[in-house]
Amino acid sequence: MRIVSLLPSATDIVVALGADQSLVGVSHSCSGDWDHLPKLTRTWIDKGASSAEIDRQVKTATRPLYELDIETLEALAPDVVISQSLCDVCAVPSGDVQQAVLGLSSQPRLVDLSPHRLADVPHCFDQVADVIDRQDEAAALKKRWDRTLDAFRGRHATNRLRILFLDWLDPPFVAGHWIPDMIDLLGITNLLGRAGDRSFATTWETIAGADPDLVIVACCGFDEMRARDETIPLGCPIILLDGHLHFSRPSPALLPSLEMLSDAVTEFMAVA
C-alpha cells in the first residue's frame, strides 16, 4: 500500500492507524519526521508575514494559493491519495486534486476528508481505514476518542465561563466548525462561534461587545509564539494556544487540543 497525504490531519490519521510506513508523500504543511518523504504541495503565500498581510495576499490572489507537484505524484505511483474539500485556503482544493488523480497511471483511490463538526471526525478515521484495510485500528481509535471526550464532558460546567475563540487576528476571525463543539463539550459558554460553519471575520468592537470572560487565540497555521507578534486590542484576559499542531487539525490531534483548552481554563480560573 502506497499512501499520499495532502493535508496534516490526514497524515495524523494515517499515523494513528499504524500505517505511517506506507506513506510515500506528504504535503509541505505536514508536521513530524517526514524529511525523507517528498513534499507534494507548495504555496507562494509568505507564511512569515503578519496575519494582515497574509489575509491581503489571499484576498487579492490572482492565481491558486497552492500548487500540486503532479510529476512527482505520478512517479510515486500511489494506491491512495487523501485530500479535503473543507477549505481552499488551508490546502490544495479538492477539484485540483481530483483532476490530477484522474490522470495518474496508478489510478489511486481518492479519499476526501471534510468534517464540519467534532462528531464528524471519527467518520474520517473510518474513511481512511476502509481504504487502507485498518478497520480494527480505527475501531480502537474511535474507542479512545470516545473515552477522552467522555472524560472531559462538562468538566467546567460549574464555572459559568464565557469564552470567545479566535483562529485569526487581523482581521479577527471567530472560530467555527468543531471548535464551538469542543467548548460546549467542556460545559463552557461559547460566544459568537457557529458550530459546523466556517470561521468568519468580525471586528474588535463586536468581540468587546460580546463581553467574554476569556479570549482564546489559536491561529490557523500559527503556533502560540508566532501569534505573540500580533497586536490584540482587547482589555480582557487572552490565552494563546498552538493552532497549527492542534486546533486546526480535525484528527486525533483534537484530543490533546481538548486537554490543552481545558488546562487553559483551569489556569485562568485559578487566578481569576
Image (cartoon, rainbow, N blue to C red):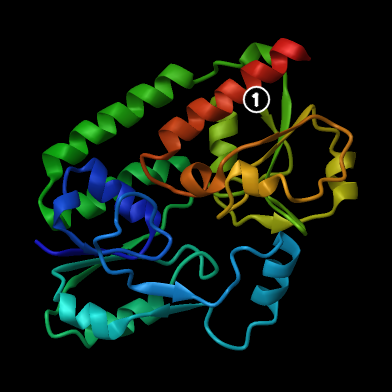
Which residue is labeled 1 in the image?
188
- List the single residue furthest toward the front: 35
| Position in image of residue 66 (x %, y %) | 47, 76
| Position in image of residue 22 (x %, y %) | 14, 56
Query: In the displayed structure, does residue 261 sit left or right of residue 111?
Result: right
Up the image or down, 170 lies above or below 217; here it is below
Nearer to us in this view, 31 or 88: 31
Query: In the displayed structure, does residue 267 sit left or right of residue 201?
Result: left
| Position in image of residue 267 (x %, y %) | 65, 17
Any part of residue 93 in sight:
no
Nearer to us in this view, 225 or 192: 225
Q: Quadrant of residue 270?
A: top right
Q: Quadrant of the N terminus?
A: bottom left
**Residue at image coords 32%, 47%:** 12
Q: Quadrant of the C terminus?
A: top right
Up the image or down, 87 lies above or below 266; here it is below
**Residue at image coords 36%, 65%:** 27
Residue type, label 1: Ile
